[in-house]
Amino acid sequence: VPLIEAFTCNECDFKLPTGWGGYVYATDAEGKRIVCPHPGEGYAIQRITGLTYEDADAAGRVGFNSDCICLACLEQFKLDLKRDPRDCPACKSHEVKSTKELIDQPCPACRKGTVRRGSPIRWPLDPDRASLPVPQIVKDFCEYAETREVPASLQEAQAAIKTIPGTKKHDLFIVCIHLLGWWQGEFFERDSEQAKSLGPYELKWPWVQAFRAAVDCTPGLNRLIRWSDGSWFFRDEITAAELRGIKNYTREHYKPPLMS
Ligand SMILES: [Zn+2]
Ligand SMILES: [Zn+2]
């Protein structure tokens, strides 16, 4: 059950893929594997297959693509180790291992060192973060993610979601982790800003309707983001300092749930 991690050799500079060790995918109608971003894989699976997680899994339309490396030529690629043969696409060698299988094993590059699981990567933070404005609702979402107790500012949203047919008990939490993931910014690009938008989402899904209802009845959130063409955008009035405040605060206070 990995956290976002770095895998490195203790002797050389050889770098293995960083992240969760791979990703969950679902296959579309043509059998193409589509990434289901973490967190929120369950909803992506639903969106891609049009099936519930259970039905998609039973139909063989869900899998995990692992980060793999060829020990012969050091090519890095993804394989579903439950379905795909261990063949290197570059040199056809069968000596292929996932990054997870390489932990505590000899480094495939220098063969002297040992591959170690590094400490979780630290987000880059801005030195002036203490002086940046952070909207209270952002702090409330972080607290909710941490404690799982619905703060006062989100109770109306929770109540509104309950009235939407098809929503589930944890839909407010799903909304919460999507927002926090967006607000933290892109992990794999150092110092990058948040993406311009979150989405796109299809309103036919109850949880997306729940998302809209939650924003509509939460003034602090409605001031921050707006819905347009199936995606969420920051409102134009939000200043650059506020965006950085949101990014730094969520980076410091929200740790994404682990993938199992
Ligand atoms: Zn190879
Ligand atoms: Zn090495």
Image (tube, grey):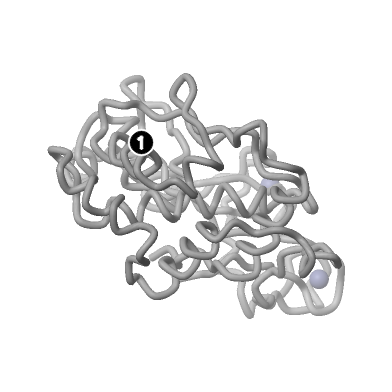
What percent of the width, then of the height, locates residue 204? Answer: 26, 26
- Can see residue 97? no
Q: Quadrant of residue 233?
A: top right
What percent of the width, then of the height, locates residue 146? Answer: 44, 72
The residue that disc 1 covers is 212
**Left or right of residue 36: residue 92:** right
**Left or right of residue 235: residue 83:** left
The number of numbered discs placed on residues in the rendered structure image is 1
Q: Quadrant of residue 52?
A: top left
Q: Quadrant of residue 234?
A: top right
Report the residue at 23% width, 36% height from top: 206
What percent of the width, then of the height, locates residue 40? Answer: 39, 49
**Left or right of residue 150: residue 145:** right
Regarding ligand 2, which quadrant of the image does it lie in?
A: bottom right
Q: Is mark 1 within 8 Å of ligand 1?
A: no
Report the residue at 26% width, 32% height from top: 205
Seen as rendered, the residue at the extreme front is 219
Front residue (pair 77, 223): 223
**Left or right of residue 155: residue 257:** right
From the image, which quarter does the N terminus lie in?
Answer: bottom left
Looking at the rendered structure, the secondary structure element under dot 1 is helix
- Can see residue 148? yes
Front residue (pair 69, 201): 201
Report the residue at 58% width, 55% height from top: 96
Q: Amino acid at mark 1?
A: Arg
From the image, which quarter does the C terminus lie in?
Answer: bottom left
36 over 11 or under it: above or below: above
What percent of the width, then of the height, locates residue 208? Answer: 33, 36
Report the residue at 39% width, 59% height from top: 153
